Image (cartoon, rainbow, N blue to C red):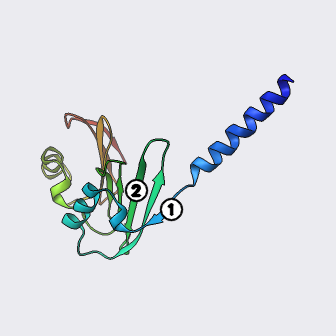
């Protein structure tokens, strides 16, 4: 009997995990939270939308918006952006904190631009146009540089 309950629990856990992985569903921009819509209108109004998806989580949803030039913007469930990645251009300078922009300009990377920026709970991570990744703590002190 114990083996039966154990097998049933494993089966249930496997089914739950497999369904939680791929629940992305296409949405239109008007289905995004208001903060996300405002962010996109402010910084990417000139780009053409390729697709937007909602990724339901146990609590809330996350969103990903992709444009035809391969720009990707990810949002948290409350509509705050979590990452912006541009394949062929700089991310909008208005979203790069001044401390990070100053570091890039004053360091050994003056001819590089921020191609990707990600804000995490306790840190920020950027990728420069030369592929160099730099991580900052919440006080904008460099904590890691990765080639």
User: Would you place residue 12 above or below residue 110 in this image?
Assistant: above
> Image height check: is 140 above or below 54?
above
Please report whichever mark, 1 or 2, sits nearer to the chain's N-terminal start: 1
Q: Position of residue 135 (x, y in %)?
A: 30, 41
Specify few, some or many for label 2: CA neighbours under 10 Å numbering under 14, 14-19, or 20 or more: many
Q: Quadrant of the N terminus?
A: top right
Q: Total marks drawn? A: 2
Q: Residues within 10 Å of mark 1 (few under 14, many from 20)?
A: few
| Most foreground residue, 112 or 67 | 67
As drawn, the residue found furthest toward the top would be: 2
Q: Quadrant of residue 111?
A: bottom left
SS of the residue under disc 2: strand
The residue lying at 30 percent from left, 52 percent from top is 79
Residue 118 or residue 103, whichever sits in front: 118
In the rendered image, the vertical position of residue 4 relative to residue 76, given as above or below: above
Q: Position of residue 54 (x, y in %)?
A: 45, 58
Judge from the rendering whether residue 81 lies leftward or rightward of residue 110; answer left or right: right
The answer, for residue 110, to whether it is visible in the render is no
Nearer-the-camera pick, 108 or 79 = 79
User: What residue sits 47% from the left and 66% below the top?
Assistant: 26
Residues at marks 1 and 2, CA–CA distance in whole angstroms:
10 Å
* Residues under numbered marks 1 and 2 in contact, where contact means CB atoms less than 8 Å apart: no
Residue 25 shows which numbered tag? Answer: 1
Could you tell me residue 143's position as x and y percent?
A: 29, 34
Q: Which residue is mark 2?
A: 63
- Which of the 4 quarters of the picture holds residue 16? top right
Q: Secondary structure at mark 1?
A: strand
């Amino acid at each position: 009997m114990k083996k039966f309950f154990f097998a049933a629990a494993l089966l249930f856990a496997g089914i739950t995990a497999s369904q939680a992985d791929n629940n992305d569903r296409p949405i239109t921009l008007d289905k995004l939270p208001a903060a996300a819509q405002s962010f996109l209108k402010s910084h990417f109004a000139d780009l053409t939308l390729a697709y937007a998806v909602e990724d339901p989580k146990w609590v809330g949803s996350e969103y990903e918006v992709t444009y035809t030039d391969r720009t990707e913007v990810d949002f948290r469930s409350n509509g705050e952006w979590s990452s912006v990645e541009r394949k062929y251009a700089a991310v909008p300078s208005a979203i790069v904190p001044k401390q990070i922009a100053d570091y890039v300009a004053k360091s050994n990377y003056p001819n590089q631009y921020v191609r990707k920026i990600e804000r995490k709970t306790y840190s920020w991570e950027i990728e420069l146009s030369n592929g160099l990744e730099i991580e900052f703590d919440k006080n904008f002190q460099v904590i890691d540089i990765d080639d």
